[in-house]
Image: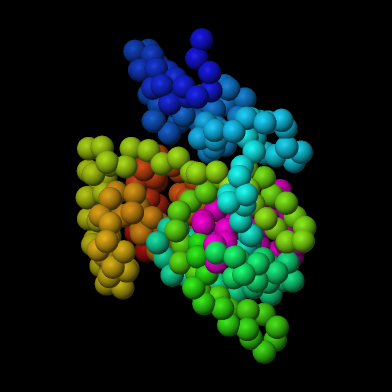
Amino acid sequence: MRDFRDAKAMAQTLREALKTKSVSLTHSESLELVATILGFRDWNVLSATIQSEVQPAANPGSTIPARVRLAAENQLPTLPVRDIVVFPHLNVPLFAGRAKTISAVEHAMAQDRRILVVTQRRPGDDNPTAADLYGVGLIASVTEVNKMNDGTIKLLVKTLTRATIVRLVEDPFLTAEIAPFDESRGQDEEAIALSRAVLEALFAARNVGQISSVYDRLQENKEPGTLADAVAAILTCDIRQKQDLLETGDVVSRLQKILALMKTDQQAA
């Protein structure tokens, strides 16, 4: 019998079996369904569990089953942000004013400058706990820190890659244990075709500033996943929709969602 490590194969088998009965599922939907069947919160948590090679005893407060305990190098000071979702490969200015957040930044600067940027579920929470944050964030490198006269700090970060939060420790500041985020179908024919459709929709919008921003990011990496993130970063949609794009590991599904949001935005205009 297969175990949870065969999840992708199980999802493909499920998808093909349902197709014979005229039930259509996307790749992403089949992954989420398998995760639920196996007793995991969602595919991101299942993926994090699969990718972990360590299987010790339970970790109190962990958001995934007790098969995972991450190494110290996968523990990052965490910067919660109120009203923004950041995507990979961006230079993003951020502000920190809460004592714990400032401590997290100072700790990052004293170590390897890496920090986890994660969005709050409710912008109004002044002292967010693990339950108040989304489960996927961005590993970022702090490139610049400036102390302001009012005691807050302004920092510039270079966002790197997505990460799944396995567990959050709240004292003396928020520290996240993270696992790699699984990204799939970034190079198949459907992803490439959808990339073209997204670019066409972008040109149809005739927003020169947005087009320039996207193309600047595509100079180094022209993969569909990079295009999806570049466009997601400039979309005019709400925080929950942007976070959903961030948490969509299947690139084809991400591009499909982006196209739908772009069409909605154009119709509203």
Task: Report the magenta residues as a range.
Answer: 113-139
Position of residue 253 in the picture relative to residue 246 (left or right): left
Taking the image as drawn, is residue 226 in sight?
yes
Q: Position of residue 149 (x, y in %)?
A: 67, 89
Residue toward you, 90 or 106: 106
Q: Position of residue 235 (x, y in %)?
A: 41, 60
Indicate yes or no whether the magenta region holds residue 263: no
Indicate yes or no whether the magenta region holds residue 114: yes
**223 over 70 or under it: above or below:** below
Q: Quadrant of residue 232?
A: bottom left
**241 over 190 or under it: above or below:** below
Position of residue 19 in the picture relative to residue 128 (left or right): left
Residue toward you, 264 or 148: 148
Q: Position of residue 234 (x, y in %)?
A: 40, 63
Residue at image position (63%, 84%) is 147
Taking the image as drawn, is residue 43 in sight?
no
Residue at image position (65%, 71%) is 106
Residue at image position (49%, 54%) is 242
Q: Position of residue 29 (x, y in %)?
A: 45, 31
